[in-house]
Amino acid sequence: MEDENPKKRNIRPTEKSNLPVITLFVLVLLVLAMLYVGYEYISDDATNSEELTSAAADTPEEKPVTSDLTEEDESEEAVVNVDEKPKASEKEKKEETKKEEPKKTEDPKAVASKIGGREITRTVKSGETFSSLASKYNLTTETLKALNPSISELKSGDKLKIRVKAVHTVGPGDILKVVSGKYSVSKEAIMKANGKSKDMASRGEELVIPFPTKR
């Protein structure tokens, strides 16, 4: 009896046995293709990394950033900083004003009028100073300088104007104790003003009578 299905008879056993081999070959090709693509991707990453490292090494150092402020801006900023300082108190302002104001030169005539007494002229000796002469005649150093504004430093031979209470001419019986009581000035002060070391005075001698207290 003959087979009714001729197509089944045409299938060859060799064709069935080759199918797994072909499938395996295709899979191997796919794996190889994937490996090749992965290798190329890794190589590209490594190349890019080397380029970035090289670029970073070749990059010059950054220069310090300089101020973009112009001289005009800086001056304005300085003004702002000055304005921000705390305001000085009224007391500090007065003290600064006193420091800045130059000392006014007093009028010798006004000084003499304020002190009173009598003016004498004395020739300065070597070694004498404003301080020593002021002490001798019971004046302050400032007063003596104000009476002689044209003299800044004493030199031997200078003519110095001095204010005293009086000039007394010694008469009969005038001893220093009597003269002291007459002008209400201590005997020691009269002796100092006249350069005396003893309580003695000659008739006709002129004695300088200093002020009892400093002026």
Image: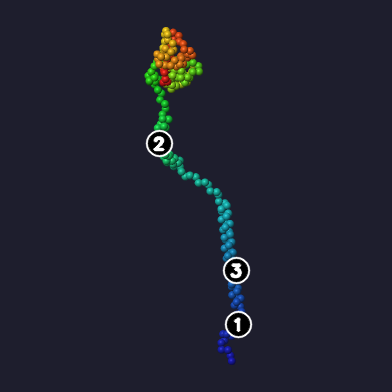
For marks 3 and 2, give the one nearer the viewer.
2
- Crowdedness of circle 3 by 10 Å Cα count: few (<14), some, many (20+)? few
Measure the C-alpha gap from mark 1 to mark 2: 120 Å
Give the vertical position of 100 relative to 214 (above or below): below
Q: In this figure, which residue is indicated by the disc labeled 2?
A: 89
Q: What numbered label is drawn on residue 67?
A: none
Residue 22 % position (x, y) = 60, 75
Q: Quadrant of residue 160?
A: top left
Residue type at mark 3 is Leu
Residue 197 % position (x, y) = 49, 14
Residues under numbered marks 3 and 2 in contact, where contact means CB atoms less than 8 Å apart: no
Q: Point out the image quarter for the C terminus.
A: top left
Q: In this figure, which residue is indicated by the disc labeled 1?
A: 12
Q: Which residue is depicted at the point 50% across and 46% down? A: 65
Q: Quadrant of residue 143?
A: top left
Give the vertical position of 76 relative to 23 (above or below): above
The one nearer the camera, 78 or 156, is 156
Q: In this figure, which residue is indicated by the disc labeled 3?
A: 32
Q: Secondary structure at mark 2?
A: loop
Residue 174 % position (x, y) = 42, 10
Q: Is residue 72 visible?
A: no
